[in-house]
Image (cartoon, helix red, strand yellow):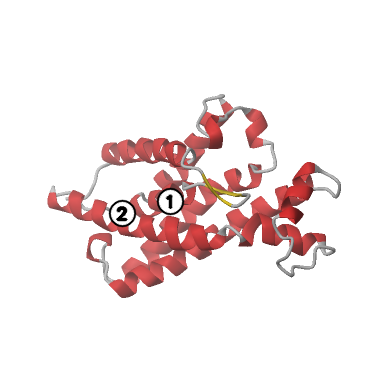
Amino acid sequence: MAVNKFVYYGLTAFMTALTGVTAQIRFYVGPIPYTMQNFAIVLSGLILPPFYAFLSQILYLLMIALGLPVASNFSGGLGVLLGYTAGYLWGFPLASLLVSVLSRLYLKRMNKTLAGLERRDLIVLLGVSFLAVLPMYLLGYYVFLYYALPGSRLYSWATGILTGTGIDLSNRFLALFVASVLVFVPQDLFMDHLLAIITAKNMARILYARGLRLS
């Protein structure tokens, strides 16, 4: 039996809440901060159909706008949605939507379900999820670029983490792209995305065992 819309609304609310929870899972590698939000974004796209995947992240942004402390470091308010990380946040709904659309196209083409994923499918979906979040990275980069002006505290942080790496710091656009995007890709892809795909497979199996099949 296919999952009905009421179950999807429940899953949507769960994914919205999960995005807020994973925003608080924060750790540092040197001066570079990482969160687990990409896990929730990719998972919502895999589990939910496109409309619900998009909705889950729109609701998350709405919660932030209302001042609820669900953004990173328990922050909230319009200031968060207009700050230097706003590009990434505004990219969440698009990324989740694209994961949903692209993953379903792949599964339909291969005549497979999430519950029946094999190792090869995991690798393909990892690539699919990376393609889906590229617009989010680009939005994040452009907003970061706007705020990280030479002489600003943000610019000093960005160039500081690249000191000794051989990156041409005189090229502001390259340096800020590395600092705001490339340093996060390995953790996002090989931790958040991979874990999301494995979790989605297990969630689909649990639902299937209860007679519910994700669409």
- Where residue 180 appears, as percent x and y from the top left, is 66, 55
Question: Residue at (68%, 62%) from the top-left corner?
Answer: 178
Q: Amino acid at mark 1?
A: Phe
Foreground of the two, 22 or 79:
22
Q: Is residue 206 left or right of residue 190?
A: left
Query: Which quadrant does the C terminus fall into?
Result: bottom left
**Label whose residue precedes the other's in the sequence (2 or 1):** 1
Q: Residues within 10 Å of mark 1 (few under 14, many from 20)?
A: many
Q: What's the residue at 69%, 55% (across, down)?
A: 161
Q: In the displayed structure, does residue 110 sit left or right of residue 95?
A: left
Q: How many marks are shown on the rendered structure? A: 2
* Residue under label 1: 39
The picture places residue 144, in percent across and down from the top left corner, at: 72, 49
Asked whether disc 2 touches disc 1, contact meaning CB atoms under 8 Å apart, the reply is yes
The single residue placed furthest to the top in the displayed view is 67
Left/right of residue 152 with respect to residue 30 in the rendered view: right
Whole-number angstrom distance, CA of label 2 to CA of label 1: 9 Å
Q: Which element type, helix, strand or loop, lies under badge 1?
A: helix
Of the residues shown, which amino acid type is indicated by label 2?
A: Thr
Where in the figure is residue 3, as x and y percent of width and height? 24, 46
Which is more toward the observer, 31 or 82?
Answer: 31
Identify the residue at image location x=37%, y=35%.
13
- In the rendered image of this protein, does residue 19 appear above or below residue 126? above
In percent of width and height, residue 113 lies at 26, 63
Query: Which residue, given by chain and number where applicable, does mark 2 sit on?
Result: 199
